[in-house]
Amino acid sequence: MTPARLNKEYSKHRELHKKLDEYASDILSSESFQSTRVHVQHGSIPVHRHCIDVAKQSLTLSHILHARVNEREMTRGALLHDYFLYDWHNKEARPKGLHGYTHPDSALRNAQRDFDLSDIEKDIIRSHMWPLTLRRIPQCKEAWIVTLADKYCSTLETLKLKRGAAQQYIENRRRNQSVQG
């Protein structure tokens, strides 16, 4: 990658993080949102990172589409879309039923308990699993964009095209040990 391309990518990354801080510093710094670091979402990606990636991808997608959206509400909804606060891999820890169908309700309940939500934010959280949850069709542009961004990020994570920090650390250690040994 050329230095100019690297600089452009770094600037884009920095701008996205600036928007996350501007729109949702209360969510990002909350103890309960921080607790999402310990639960794995897809592959080896923690829920915390997945939600941040979905928020950044939603902002990027809205710009690509030239969509007139409320960036603040879209970002906040994206961060909270998987705010279910349990290890979904543990059958005893999660609610009854299939996680894919039930977690939007858990996320919405938790988000309403911990934050003041707008109608757009509620729609994003409630409908992000469409079309799996057929009756919950997104009702606003922001919810459609987050739903698409979530599908994109989830696909990369599930197919291991995007690896979690833990997996990368282990692979780098193995690589370094084989070079040294």
Image (cartoon, helix red, strand yellow):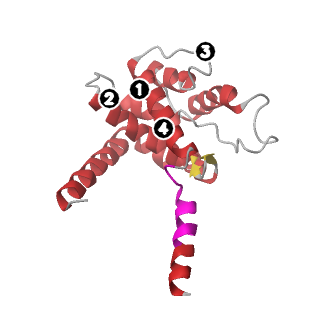
Identify the residue at horizontal 57%, vertical 32% (top origin): 111
In this view, 76 is above or below 159: above
Q: Position of residue 102 (x, y in %)?
A: 69, 27
| Three-letter residue code for mark 4 | Leu
Query: Which tag, 3 or 4, sits closer to the chain's start?
Result: 4
Q: CA distance from mark 3 to mark 4?
A: 22 Å
Residue 145 is marked as 1
Viewport quadrant of the N terminus: bottom left
Q: CA distance from mark 3 to mark 2?
A: 24 Å
Q: Which residues are magenta?
A: 161-172
Query: Which tag, 3 or 2, sits closer to the chain's start?
Result: 2
- Check the image and name the residue furthest to the bottom: 181
Q: CA distance from mark 4 to mark 1?
A: 13 Å
Q: CA distance from mark 1 to mark 3?
A: 17 Å
Identify the residue at horizontal 57%, vertical 61% (top origin): 167
| Three-letter residue code for mark 2 | Ser
In this view, 108 is above or below 27: above
Residue 62 is marked as 2
Q: Nearer the viewer, mark 3 or mark 4?
A: 3
